[in-house]
Image (tube, grey):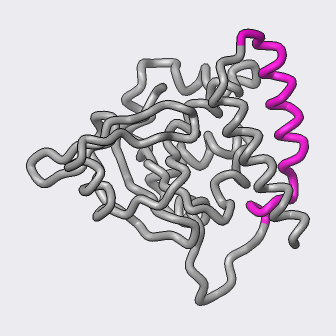
Amino acid sequence: MLKTIYNSLIIAIIITLLFSCSQENDSIDNQITQEISENIHNGQASIEAVEGEQLNALQVAMSIPEFSTLVSAIETAGVEDAVVNTGPLTIFAPLNTAFEDLPEGTLENLVRIQNRATLINILINHVAPSNYPEKQLRKEAKKGRKLYMASGEYLIIEEIDDEIFIGGSKILKSVDVSNGWIHVIDDVLIP
């Protein structure tokens, strides 16, 4: 069990480091992405929930039909374990309608094996490696701060008419999960 947790943390660190640095060589990106995916099988994502315990971010997303496209993208990218690590994580989770609003053919193109590194980068651009409940997001917005995302990007957090926005996308609902928070949004946050 400790080995599984250790491996998952190492993988999450590798993914974060991989995409926080600019890579000039796509073949290196593809090779590293392949090595990460080969090491992810049988990781934390394969652990099932125990009755009475709070669900992690992936388990919650898998239980809500409106996140089926997001879950499919996470599985296609092979980053399930990064989403279930002990956190804390704050995930800005796009609904299916957000993926439907992308230009025609974008999603189909992203899930192709040759575009896996790009898909991973987009997915980790929805994850802040810290604990941001709604109350904290409001404080950050009032201070005019930007949130650091696992992709290495910084997204503007704003409060407009008592609503919270991240990268221009309105937070529709917030869910407390065992490894942090899920904030539901209706846009895909493309880096």
**Residue 165: image location, x then y, percent:** 26, 44
* Residue under the point 87% across and 58% down: 42
Residue 56 placement (x, y as % from top left) = 59, 68
* 104 to 129, vertically: above or below: above
What is the span of residues highlighted in magenta in the rendered image?
A: 24-46
Q: In the rendered view of the protein, which quadrant contains the N terminus?
A: bottom right
Q: x%, y% of residue 144?
A: 24, 41
Q: Residue at x 84, y 29 (%)?
A: 32
Q: In which image quadrant can residue 150 be found?
A: top right
Instruction: Name the foreground residue: 47 vs 13.
Output: 13
Q: In this rendering, would 61 be left or right of 103?
A: right
View extreme (top): residue: 24
Q: Is residue 105 magenta?
A: no
Q: Percent position (x, y) of residue 141? A: 25, 47
Q: In the depicted view, which residue is nearer to us: 57 or 98? A: 57
102 relative position to 87: left or right:
left
Q: Is residue 138 left or right of residue 110?
A: left
Left or right of residue 1: residue 177: left
* 37 drawn magenta: yes
Question: Where 20 falls versus 41 (above or below)?
Answer: above
In this rendered view, identify the residue nearer to me: 135 or 37.
135
